[in-house]
Amino acid sequence: MSREKILEAIKKNKPAPKELPEVIGFASTYTNLTITFAESIRKAGGELITVQDMTSIPARIRQALPGMQRIADLVNESPDTYRHLLNDPASLEVVVLKGRLAVAENGAIWLHESDCVNRVYPFITQHLVLIVEQHTLVGNMHEAYVIMGNMMNSYGVFIAGPSKTADIEQSLVIGAHGARSLLVFLVGPGV
C-alpha cells in the first residue's frame, strides 16, 4: 500500500475531537510549607539551611563543604568566571544552582534548563547546592504544575535529594548516578 493511501485511510477514520476532562485540583493542606519542605529534604537525604538573604550563602557553602576547591557558583557569579571548570564538567566538586520553585510534600526542586547553564551540571557534580526562594514554595506537585505552565516548553528537571539507588539485595548507594550530597538554601525573610 502506498504512503498516500495509508495517510488517506487514517484521515477518513480519524475519531471526532472530544473535550478534555475537567482538571481536578488537589490543594495541599500543609499548615507550614517551610517546615514540611525541611522535613521532606531531610527524608530525601539532603540538608536544608535557611537564610534571610543571599549574602551569607558562599561562606555557608564553604563551611558545609570544607576542603572543596572546584566550586562553580552559577547563581552569584557569571559562568565565565568558571569557564576553566565548566569545560571539564567531570572535575566539578560543587555546583550551585537556583531552583525556580520547590514542593513541600516531597522536597522536589524545579530546575529549568536556563538555570542549569548546561544540563549535565546538576548530575555530574559531586555535591549539588540548590538555592530556593521561600516565596516559591508550593504544597504539592499539582500546585507546582499549575505554576509551571509555560515553563515546560523546554528541558527542566525536578531534583529531590542526592542521587540514590538500591539493588535487589537492598544495598543503598548514595551518589551512584549523580551528586553524592544535596545542600538546599531556603532564602526568605523570617525563615
Image (cartoon, helix red, strand yellow):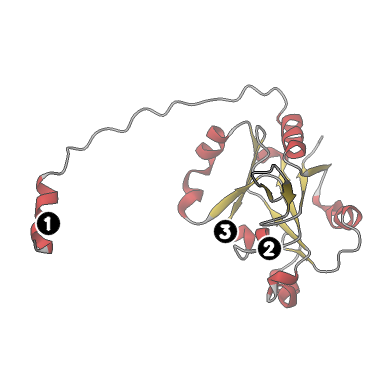
Label 3, label 1: how far apart the Cα atoms are: 39 Å
Q: Amino acid under label 2? A: Ile
Helix, strand or loop status at disc 3 = helix
Q: Which mark is residue 108?
A: none
In contact (CB < 8 Å): disc 3 and disc 1: no
Q: Residue at x 76, y 30 (%)?
A: 35
Locate residue 137 relative to residue 63 in the image: left or right. left
Q: Which residue is mark 1?
A: 6
Report the front residue among 45 and 27.
45
Report crowding for label 2: few under 14, some 14 to 19, many 20 or more residues within 10 A (C-alpha): many
Q: Which residue is mark 2?
A: 124
Helix, strand or loop status at disc 2 = helix
Percent coordinates x, y for residue 93 in the rendering: 78, 64
Label 2, label 3: how far apart the Cα atoms are: 15 Å
Q: Which residue is mark 3?
A: 113
Work out which residue is located at the far front of the displayed protein and give it.
169
Percent coordinates x, y for residue 152 in the rendering: 49, 50
